[in-house]
Structures are given as C-alpha cells and as structure tokens.
Amino acid sequence: MTRPIHLFTSDLLEYYGAVIEQTGESVNAVIPEPLRSQLGLPEYANITFSPDSAEISFLVSYGSDLFKGFSKLIGKRGYFSEVQLPSPQIRAEKFEKKACEKVVLKNAVYDIEKQEIKNISYLLSYYKYHAVSEEKKEGISSVLINECNLSANPFYGEIDELLAASRQETVQSAEKQEISSVLATIKSAHSYLVLEELEEFTNSLERRLNNDVRRVNEYYRTLINEINDRIRIRNLFGEEKDKYLSKIKTIETEMKFKEQDLIDRYTLNISIEPLSFIRFTVKTPVLWLRLKRRKESRLFPLAYNPILKTADLLPCESCFKHDSSYYICDDKLHILCNECFSECPDCEKQYCRVCHKTGCPRCKKNLKPEQ
C-alpha cells in the first residue's frame, strides 16, 4: 500500500523542521529557512491536495512544481536502496504443493528436477502515472519482480513492515537476469497495472463520450430531418432541391467535425515515470521445474516469495502478465499466456509472440516493424 500524499507531505515537512496542522483536505504549515527557499514557500503556507480547493493555497499533486521540489529535497536517497531479509520458515513439502498448484500447462508437462535454497533478489519498484483527458487522474503504482525468473506482481503491502523485518548486514549477491530485461518487465507490468487501476476512470470517460456524441448526433440529425421534410412537403426538385441537399452535406460535415472534436477532447493520454526502487535479497526455497514440450525441455526456477508469502506465479515471457494456465511454444519453449499464444485472425494458426514479434510467421499478414 502506498502512503497517501497528504501524509507523506506532512511527514516530510515535519522532518525538515516545519510545524504542521492538518485541516481537512489541506495542511497549514509554518515553514523555517532554508526550507522556504528550497521549496519556494512563504513562512506561513496553506498546502492543499485538491485542485478544486477554494482556498488560496499551494497545490501538491504528483505533477506539481512543489512535489518536484520534494524530489530535489530528498535527492538520491529516495531512488534506490538494498536490504537483506531473513529466510522464510516454510516446509519443503508445503512449498512444493503450493507451487505445483499454480503451474497449469495446456500443451506441455513438467517434472520437478530439484529443490534448493538460493539467494533470490526481489526488486520493488514505484512508478507515478498521469492520465490526462477532459479530467486528470494521477497516482502511484508498485510492482514486485523476481529478478531471477521475471515473475512480477502488484504490491499492496506495507513497506514499513518489510523494512522492520530486514537485517542490518551486508547484502549478499543473488542470481539476476540482465537489468535491461528486468526493467522492460517492470515497465510492462506497471503499464498493465495502471490500466487496471484506471478502468473505472476510463469507463466513465467512455460513457460521457458516448452520451455527448449521441446528443450531437441527435441534434444534427434533427436538422437534416427538418430539411428533408421541407423538400418533401414543398415537393422541391431541380436547383431548389440541390440547394437544400447542399445544406444537408454541410450539416453532415459539421457533425463529423463535432464528433471528432469530442473524441479528441476525451482521448486519454497516460504517462508513467519511475520514482524509486528497493531491492530485497533473501535466501528462499527454489523449485526447479523441467518444462517438456515434445522432445525438447528447459529448466525454470520457481521461488517461494517471502514478501507475498506464496509461491511465485509463472510469468508470460511475452507480456509478463500472469494467467490461470499457460502454453509452451515449440521453438524456444517460451512460457506464454493464452492471449500471447492465441490464433492469428487471418490463418488461425497459434504462434509465439516472443519468437515472432512482428506477426504471424505463416500468413505474413499484419506484420509490425520489429523493435
């Protein structure tokens, strides 16, 4: 769970010597020097967190200048840290059972090769997002990723509890994927998570867009119907009729422009930006699965996640989302969710979105440029 922005602001200002008074949706603060100069605030400041506030105040939002000033105040201390967690206490049989319950393969089988205790690294990332349309919505998303197998999960826990459980000792090294792969997975996971968190917001925008388009359409259709009635009642023909038909074309063109204006007005632009990272290293049980597809096989590590207190889920190696069941591709034995091993809409061939990033290898249709 992320800390609410008003509590974070109060704690930060108090830490640097300000006197704080909470008043509903705002904060009254007495700001000492040099904090005043660093943040560009007067000695007595009313700080609000709602853009609709009627008071004369300083707005704090994730995109505001004042919030950016907080980032400068904290400096690099808030960007990255590493901690060592104590080893979880879980029986090998219980972990194996929990892990196997989550591994459902539709076109392959697996064997358990071995179970061992390994140093595993989990990277907790916080991103801020801005969603701008007719209205603006912003927030913070958090994702926890196993840097060894790229299994990523939303994180809704209390970070204070994790830090309290950490050990004051040298952080041990752990096996990790290339940082470029880890960061690509993190960005993908945050993108999907933000879309989920904005679902209610986007649905509301879509409903309002549809209502506004319908009203515009009804208005202009009424005008067109009135002109058609005049043509019919007056029994117009020739140049007179053409004059009215020209008006109808003008109205239809204007209606299309109005509808496009509404679409542009409600278009949702979403941006995400990294805030901070915490790496947790822990000695934890790892189950090595041998995934088998036809005559080929590969090993895949599935760890017990002591932060979420459950076994890691298999990651789709294309979109990095989790699914209730998975496919294994024939060529490289990639793990794929149902969507990333779906049929081509033209030739109905299932194909791996990792092996064939540009499109269907059979029909060569709808090919995208490889990135």
Image (cartoon, grey):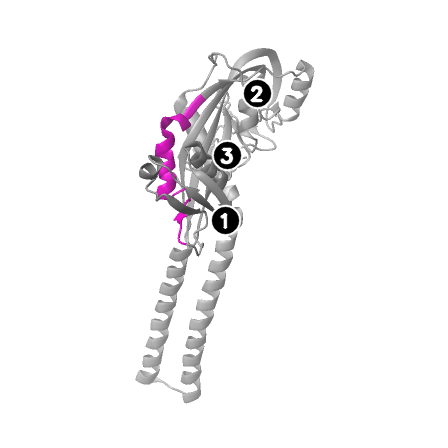
Real-space Cα distance between discs 1 and 3?
A: 45 Å
Which badge, 1 or 3, comes first in the chain's sequence? 1
Q: Secondary structure at mark 1?
A: loop
Which badge, 1 or 2, comes first in the chain's sequence? 1
Q: Is residue 314 visible?
A: no
Label 1, residues with CA under 10 Å away: few <14, some 14-19, many ≥20: few
Q: Nearer the viewer, residue 273 or 80?
A: 80
Real-space Cα distance between discs 3 and 2?
A: 38 Å
Q: Amino acid at mark 3?
A: Cys
Residue 105 on the magenta segment: no
Magenta-drawn segment = 56-81
Q: Amino acid at mark 1?
A: Glu
Which image quadrant is residue 290 in?
top right
Report the residue at 47% width, 70% height from top.
218
- Residue bearing the label numbered 3: 340
Numbered circle sitting on residue 165: 2
Label 3, residues with CA under 10 Å away: few <14, some 14-19, many ≥20: many
Which image quadrant is residue 289 in?
top right
Q: Secondary structure at mark 3?
A: helix
Q: Secondary structure at mark 2?
A: helix
Q: Amino acid at mark 2?
A: Ala
- Residue bearing the label numbered 1: 25
Q: Is residue 41 left or right of residue 294?
A: left
Query: Which x, y percent locates residue 142?
Result: 49, 33
Q: Quadrant of the C terminus?
A: top left
